[in-house]
Image (spheres, grey):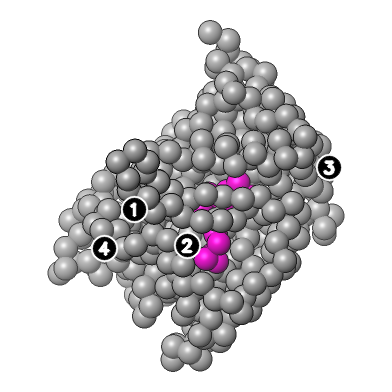
Amino acid sequence: MKKNLDIPIGISGIAAYIPPYRVWLNDWCEWTGNQWPKIREVVGRSFRLRGNQHSVYTMAATAVIRLIDQYDIDPNRVKFLALGTESSTDNSAGAIIIKGMINEALLSRNKSPISRSCEVPEFKHACLGGVYAMKGAIRHIALDGAGDQAIVVCADIAEYPLGSSGEPTQGAGAVAMLVEENPKLLEVDIMNSGSASDYRILDFRKPMIRFCSQERKLSQQVQDFPIFNGKYSTTCYLDETLHALDDMYNKRKLNPISYLRSLKTVFMHRPYRKMPETGLAIAYLFALSRGNPDDRAELTSYCYEAGIDPIKVMHEMQVYTPDIKDLANPIDLNNEAYPMTMAIFRIFRASRHYRREVLDKMALGSDTMLDLGNLYTAALPAWIAAGLEQALKENIDLTDNEILTFGYGSGDAAEVIPFKVCKEWRNAAKNIQFAEAMSFTIDLNKAQYLDLHTGKSTNTLSYELKNEFIIERVGDSVEKNYQDMGIEYHRYIK
């Protein structure tokens, strides 16, 4: 077996596809009677919807073809094509669908297709599927795929029922990444990453029974609403983040608070604006409890201001180990796993340290993310792409910086992975074109939003297609000698 464990492996290119259909949350608040100042502060500015011609496969394939074009990739060298998603509508095939779409597009341009010997796995674990796919690609290249290139595409459609607390956090899009040896953009250090997983019963789930009474045809998309519980979801996010960080701290023998303060840039899974800010803030407070006397004095000051005994807070942070599954019932669902810590967090959020230790570290790309909504598996790579593009535009030197990334899989798992910014990152970042991928928009009125939300087609939202895959039709045959019911037939528009 070929092994390549000593050569750096990471990301050399990023490309994205974002559907143009945009809902301004200010408008949405007027339609629904919600409070715009609160939504703006907690969620963001706008979100995108998939159109009737879109599926997770069309968006993923469009992101991949853009990656190939923007970075002049030789498809023959691609021996690993992985799809990370939680929005797949085929329970058998996944990445192979995308490979087939890409190859047809390449052949139509008289270009070579992706290698026949390319592996085509799909990774599924809620929003963490894309991170697992990236780790799988790195392991492939480090072992039997030495010298190969890999493409990882994260694509999702985040939809929630009308009137639910998740409705303003919807989104859709895809981000593709080129993974190879001696990367040009970001070296990924999975050897020193941190992992955590724990079964949480009912957050965040998509039981197949939801599909049983739905039709699949071009004029009616399948609606993929999840089973979720908002407060419990936040608790799960925070707890998994803390455990994944502890795993990384132990592997690297790090002083938690010194390490967190040393970071200049952090990217986290972002279901909505406030969630990653809260996650990093709680991690900072826990790290203070394990620091030197000055660090613990800072934590104590927050405790006194909150009227809470610091000794009890230290016990909650260092000794207490809640079983989050115990909260997964109708009575305890809204309880806090770390109630004293959350009370102190509210004090910390108003302090002068909060901007320096939390907001400033998340500044790169954060404004762009206010207009994306939740992209599930694509949320983290989208933020990375937006952040690198902003750093390039504003001439911020990231060379050799360690960037910490947090991937999260809704309740059950988390990954904390350090990235190192490569010396050639500027040249590679020039080709990301993330702002361009977001530039074309069609703003929706209330009627159009309701139609797209229910998967209906609308003649008022057509636009000139270019360099994009669409669903041309959906099969409906269930004959003795021929069946294609529910199969999507795709077409590439040059």
Tell me, yes or no, whether the highlighted magenta stretch contains residue 97: no
Crowd around label 1: few <14 · some 14–19 · many ≥20 (10 Å) = many
Task: Give the mark toward the camera: 2 or 4.
Answer: 2
Q: Mark 4 points at which residue?
A: 213
**Three-letter amino acid code of the residue under disc 1:** Gly
In the image, farthest residue toward the top: 1
At 39% from the left and 59% from the top, the residue drawn is: 216
Task: Give the mark toward the camera: 3 or 4.
Answer: 4
Q: Mark 1 points at which residue?
A: 411
Residue interval drawn in magenta: 50-62
Quarter occupied by residue 329: bottom left
The answer to whether residue 133 of the structure is visible from this angle is no
Is residue 223 depicted above or below 2 in this figure?
Answer: below
Label 2: which secondary element: loop
User: What label sits on residue 387 in the rendered view?
Assistant: none
At 54% from the left and 59% from the top, the residue drawn is: 54
User: Dots 3 and 2: beta carbons under 8 Å?
Assistant: no
User: Dots 1 and 4: beta carbons under 8 Å?
Assistant: no
Q: Mark 2 points at which residue?
A: 218
**Horizontal side of residue 469 vs 228, given as left or right:** right
Query: Residues under labels 1 and 4: Cα distance?
Result: 27 Å
User: Dots 2 and 4: beta carbons under 8 Å?
Assistant: no
At 51% from the left and 56% from the top, the residue drawn is: 473
Query: Residues under labels 1 and 3: Cα distance?
Result: 37 Å
Task: Give the mark toward the camera: 1 or 4.
Answer: 4
- Of residue 63 and residue 336, the one placed in the foreground of this image is 63
Query: Residues under labels 3 and 2: Cα distance?
Result: 41 Å
Label 4: which secondary element: loop
Q: Mark 3 points at which residue?
A: 427
N-terminal of the two: label 3 or label 4?
4
